[in-house]
Image (tube, rainbow, N blue to C red):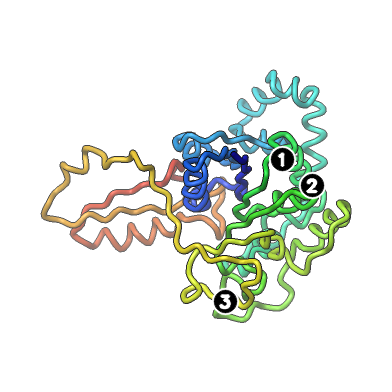
Amino acid sequence: MARFLFTTLPTNDLGLLARSLPIARELSERGHEIVFCSPGRAPRILIAEAGFENLRPKHPIYEVGAAKLNPVGLARLLRSKRVRDEYGGALSFIWELARAAPVRFARSSPETWSMDHAAAMAGLMNANFVRANCEALKRLIVEVQPEAVVDFWNPFACIAARALDKPLVTVIQADAHPGNPGFIWWKEPPDGLPSATPAANKVLAGYGLASISKLDDLNLGDLTLIVGTPETDPIPDTTGCAYVGPILWQDPDAVPPSWLDHLDDDRPVVWVYSGNPRYGSKRTAWDSEIVLEACITTLARMDVQVVLTTGHHDLP
């Protein structure tokens, strides 16, 4: 039996869980042990429902991300036994958080051209922020002692695995492969897009690792699995890559809710799932709220019944 650490991009999304949970379940059924690291609130719920252990990296960034950030919630966190035991008290906690806090962000853009561009807008232009996250993931890998890290788009975990010389399997979509032109592959990107690569290279150099030409290079592991097919999702160089087809998670014990039987049989039912409607208090280019608005506008004119689910996310 082998132990695998599954790491995902540490955002509050379920998309990467739709890929990772089916693989985790298959490996678990074959007798292997799976430990997750996916600290977002919605992923924590889904992973717990699937019956897997989910560990959070030890760093104030992740503590704050898991807590309610109103003044009462933050004060409760700073006074907690966890902060005293794990970080030496509130002052040490705040100091460690301040040293890692990102201060440089690329300007928000309605178009996200690549993983590198997205990372620059998310704060990864700050080497201290990148290093703090990588160190937290390194400590977690040492604690779990997996035979391999199986990563779903977390650049910090990819760097940490390389720094520890731990076998790395990556699972990505074709447009995240560094040989592809990016997310908006049908258009030429503008010149001078901001990049998180210089900050990542500073951290890589500190670990004695080779530099990268763009952040997407981190998506290549010792084995890289591509969701999709060569016909629909081609990549120019398949060296070290294997296509695994479409992957989708469904709880094998799930049953339709009883109220579904009481809907009108004479009108179609449209089931709407948007993903995370809004990532923060203000709207961003990544929010799925715009999808909900479009659905409301369109479906309101149609004689249909609409069921809305937001996947453990609150509506703004």
- As helix, strand or loop, the secondary structure at mark 1 comes to helix
Q: Nearer the viewer, residue 282 or 64?
A: 64
Location of the N terminus by quadrant is top right
Query: In the image, which is nearer the foreground, mark 3 or mark 1?
Result: 1
Q: Position of residue 179 (x, y in %)?
A: 66, 74
Q: Position of residue 217 (x, y in %)?
A: 71, 65
Q: Position of residue 257 (x, y in %)?
A: 26, 39
Marked residue nearer the N-terminal end (3 or 2): 2
What amino acid type should be assigned to the residue bearing mark 2?
Answer: Leu
What amino acid type should be assigned to the residue bearing mark 3?
Answer: Trp
Asked if the residue at tag 2 contacts the one at tag 1, i.e. Cβ–Cβ closer than 8 Å, the answer is: yes
What amino acid type should be assigned to the residue bearing mark 1?
Answer: Ile
Residue corresponding to mark 2: 164
Q: Nearer the viewer, residue 282 or 291?
A: 291
Most extreme residue toward the left is 266
Gap in Å between the C-alphas at discs 3 and 2?
A: 34 Å
Q: Position of residue 101 (x, y in %)?
A: 76, 44
- As helix, strand or loop, the secondary structure at mark 2 comes to loop
Residue corresponding to mark 3: 185
- As helix, strand or loop, the secondary structure at mark 3 comes to loop
Residue corresponding to mark 1: 141
Q: Nearer the viewer, residue 56 or 300?
A: 56
Q: Quadrant of residue 139?
A: top right
Gap in Å between the C-alphas at discs 3 and 1?
A: 35 Å
- The residue sitting at 22% across, 37% down in the picture is 258
Specify few, some or many for label 3: CA neighbours under 10 Å numbering under 14, 14-19, or 20 or more: few
